[in-house]
Amino acid sequence: MSLIFYLSSLSYPPQPLPQTVKEAPIIEHFIEFAILGSLLFIGFRSIKIYKYALLFAILVGIFYAITDEIHQFFVPGRYASIFDVIVDSLGIIFAVILMKIYEKKIFNI
């Protein structure tokens, strides 16, 4: 979360990007929040609320995605985007469900 916060704090002037490069931030958002979702799931699985790890990981991850976009709203050269929150949320949900499937397959939980 600290790394995501730091990267969101970086200010940059808007620049026109070639069409092929415009998809890069979408992929970056998806991957970094998928990693966050995986780590949240692992963290919640290791404490007493392990039964609800999937739900808590998704809710906390999406809440963080929303607060990250609000934070970007106040950074010069950045803007808040509901589309980014959607991509971030999809990354979190994808990773958490993948982790749950992996857990069921490996540990038969």
Image: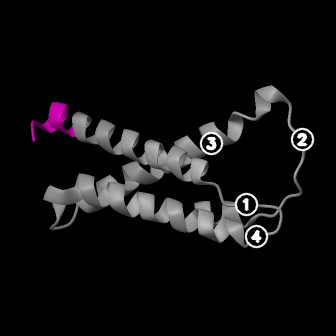
Secondary structure of residue under mark 3 = helix
Residue 88, image x and y in percent? 51, 49
Marks 4 and 3, how far apart at CA:
19 Å
| Magenta stretch, main secondary structure class | helix
Q: CB of mark 2 within 8 Å of CB of mark 4?
A: no
Q: Which quadrant holds the C terminus?
A: top left
* Vertical relation: 74 (above or below) 85: below
Residue 15, image x and y in percent? 90, 47
The foreground one among 35 and 77 is 77
Marks 2 and 3, how far apart at CA:
18 Å
Q: Which residue is drawn at 78% across and 32% down?
A: 21
Residue 67, image x and y in percent? 54, 68
The mark that comes first in sequence, 2 or 3, is: 2
The mark that comes first in sequence, 4 or 3, is: 3
The kind of residue tagged 1 is: Tyr
The kind of residue tagged 4 is: Val
Label ID, residue 75 = 4
Residues shaded magenta: 103-109
- Magenta stretch: includes residue 106: yes
What residue did someone put label 1 on?
79
Marks 1 and 2, how far apart at CA:
15 Å
Q: Residue at x 23, y 61 (%)?
A: 46
- How crowded pointer 3 is (Cα within 10 Å; few <14, some 14-19, many 20+) is rated as some
What residue did someone put label 3 on?
28
Residue 1 is at least partly visible in this image: no
Label ID, residue 70 = none
Q: Residue at x 78, y 26 (%)?
A: 20
Label ID, residue 16 = 2
Relative side of 73 to 51, left or right: right
- How crowded pointer 2 is (Cα within 10 Å; few <14, some 14-19, many 20+) is rated as few
The mark that comes first in sequence, 2 or 4, is: 2
Q: CB of mark 4 within 8 Å of CB of mark 3?
A: no
